[in-house]
Amino acid sequence: MKKEKKNLNTILKMNKSTEIIKEELSYINEQALFADGFDKALVGIDQSDYVAVYDIDKCIDILMEDMPYMTLDQIIEYFEYNTLGAYVGEYTPRFIKIYEQ
């Protein structure tokens, strides 16, 4: 039960920070674009171009949950082609690899 409560608190905190990032970015840059389906991977705002920034590893985790029938290699290839390879204009979101210390 304790673990479930912790997970729920983490989800609520994440949702709140996602909402704050989206709200702040939309205020700064009304034309900013967001990656559909990757709200849980939204980690910040690029301060030079004012675009959404997503964590690549979190995006891969989301795809693994959404597409359990695909292997990790297939998911990475899908993500690289369909998301990283997609340019939708000046305000295309950025995807970054975060290295833990």
Image (cartoon, rainbow, N blue to C red):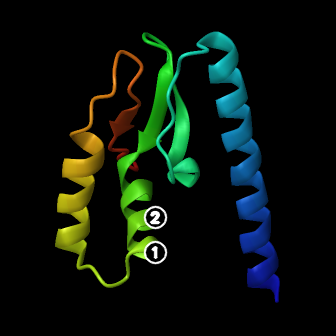
- Residue at the disc numbered 2: 62
Q: Secondary structure at mark 2?
A: helix
Residue 40's place in the image compared with 5, above or below, is above
Residue 51's place in the image compared with 9, above or below, is above
Residue closest to the far bottom: 1
Residue closest to the far front: 88
Q: Residue at x 19, y 50 (%)?
A: 81
Q: What x and y, as percent, mark residue 58?
A: 44, 57
Of the numbered discs in the image, which one, if any, rests on residue 15? none
- Residue at the disc numbered 1: 65
Q: What x and y, as percent, mark residue 61?
A: 42, 66
Residue 35's place in the image compared with 77, above or below, is above
Going by the numbered disc 1, the residue's amino acid type is: Glu
Q: Which quadrant is the N terminus positioned in?
A: bottom right
Query: Residue 18 occupies which quadrant of the picture?
Result: top right
Q: Residue at x 31, y 85 (%)?
A: 69
State the residue in front, 70 or 47.
70
Mark 1 and mark 2 residues within 8 Å of each other at the beta carbon: yes
Q: Left or right: where does residue 31 sit relative to residue 95? A: right
Q: What x and y, as percent, mark residue 47?
A: 49, 14
Q: Gap between marks 1 and 2, in whole Å?
A: 5 Å
Q: Residues within 10 Å of mark 2 (few under 14, many from 20)?
A: some
Q: Left or right: where does residue 73 sit relative to residue 20? A: left
Going by the numbered disc 2, the residue's amino acid type is: Ile
State the residue in front, 83 or 9.
83
Q: Secondary structure at mark 1?
A: helix
Q: Residue at x 55, y 32 (%)?
A: 44
Residue 87's place in the image compared with 98, above or below, is above
Q: Left or right: where does residue 73 sit relative to residue 89? A: left
Q: Residues within 10 Å of mark 1 (few under 14, many from 20)?
A: few
